[in-house]
Amino acid sequence: MALKIIHIFNHDKFVDQYIANIKPGNFENTFIFLKNENTYSASSQIVKHVVPYSKDYYEIIEECVLYDIIILYDLDKEKINIVNRLQYNNATIIWVFYGADLYSLPELKERLFSDETVNLLDLNIARNISYYFKRIIRPIYQYFKGNKSSIVARRQAIAKIDFFALYGREEYDYLNNKLKNKLPQFIEYLVAATFTSIPYTTEKSDSILVGNSASPYNNHIDIIKKLEKLNYTGRVTIPFNYGSNKKYIEKFRDEIKKYKVSICMLDNFVALDEYISLIQQHSAAVFYSYRQMAMGNIFIALCSGVKVYLSKQNPSLSWFERVGFKIFNVETDLETDVLTSNLKLSKESMVLNRKVYYQVVKDINSGFLTKLAEIGKTKRSA
């Protein structure tokens, strides 16, 4: 009898990849798209749309007992509620980590902004007020009101989960250390497309892509200041068509008026093919976040022959280096490369990065399927 797995997700742009990743396995899969609005339709014949907290939602919770494995893609509040409501659960629960599902916790969120970003957002004062409210006032308020805080609910759910699925152990160890070894057991998994249709070309414009969105975690202003100081004369593209922090967006737009660097703000949403084409044109891409984010953008850039720079403070950098990518760091490599006009990858490095990417995706996801089969075999022999 095939292993029964229920997949619960809410990110429509990744659904096809979830299905493609699990398809080679000999499993009986149920796919649940959990969102108020049904924004996914490509494989609607095998993906069931369920509205959170609806009758179907609570039926799904009751039916979880029928499955061998439950895979939760991103641990948001709706999935946290599912885990905490499970009774007499014998299924193995796997949590596919995204980023915001942990980096929003106070002990992880602090110090993810550079000093420049902190100053831009006036966060020194805001942090003190926020700390006082979150750590002192809010718990007292919730105690007397009788509410269970989202952080408490999240931690209770994490304690019930069996595996934490992530692309590499480097970030897992970083997170687990910060959370005092409270994370579930590590298992390798990578939500990544094959990008087989992405061509690479050695013909690149003198341009740098900075960040992946309007999120302040990109620490954009540090890179703009650095490029200004180095008298960089090429074009700088900043994707600002994704992100909801209005305060940061307004302050950043106002701040960059002070600089002579040629900046092109990407404000409008574009189709994926068009966005990939945009990334391909750049000689370099700089992602100065101190946490894992923009993995899709990074992989597209690497497969497109773009020279990628990450912060040394980002635990992802160690993983990229370990698995064999030709990748660079912002703190020591970027300045040297700008001054020596060395912002383009060699053809050999372009070919290497594509080869490494395809092999890594294949190895990690085939290993994940093998692990699922082992989990099922162990459960049924117990």
Image: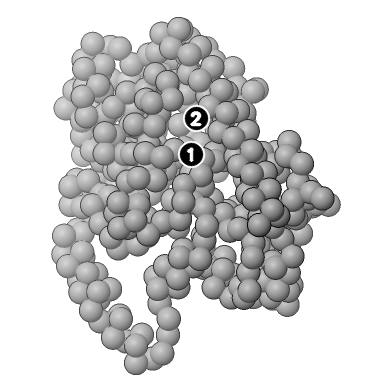
Question: In the rendered image, which quarter is residue 274 located in?
Answer: top right
Which of discs 1 and 2 lies nearer the camera? The answer is: 1
User: Contact, CB < 8 Å: mark 1 with mark 2?
Assistant: no
Percent position (x, y) of residue 165?
Answer: 51, 47
Q: Is residue 86 left or right of residue 184?
A: right
Camera-nearest residue between 378 and 122? 378
- Name the residue that disc number 2 marks: 299
Percent position (x, y) of residue 279?
Answer: 49, 27
Q: Amino acid at mark 1?
A: Tyr
* Residue found 62% across the figure and 75% down from its top: 87
- Name the residue that disc number 1 marks: 167
Camera-nearest residue between 231 and 257? 231
Q: Residues within 10 Å of mark 1 (few under 14, many from 20)?
A: many
On screen, residue 171 above or below 243: above
Circle 1 SS class: loop
Question: In the rendered image, which quarter is residue 178 located in?
Answer: bottom left
Q: Tag 2 or tag 1, which sits nearer the N-term?
A: 1
Which residue ends up furthest to the bottom in the rendered image? Answer: 144
Circle 2 SS class: helix
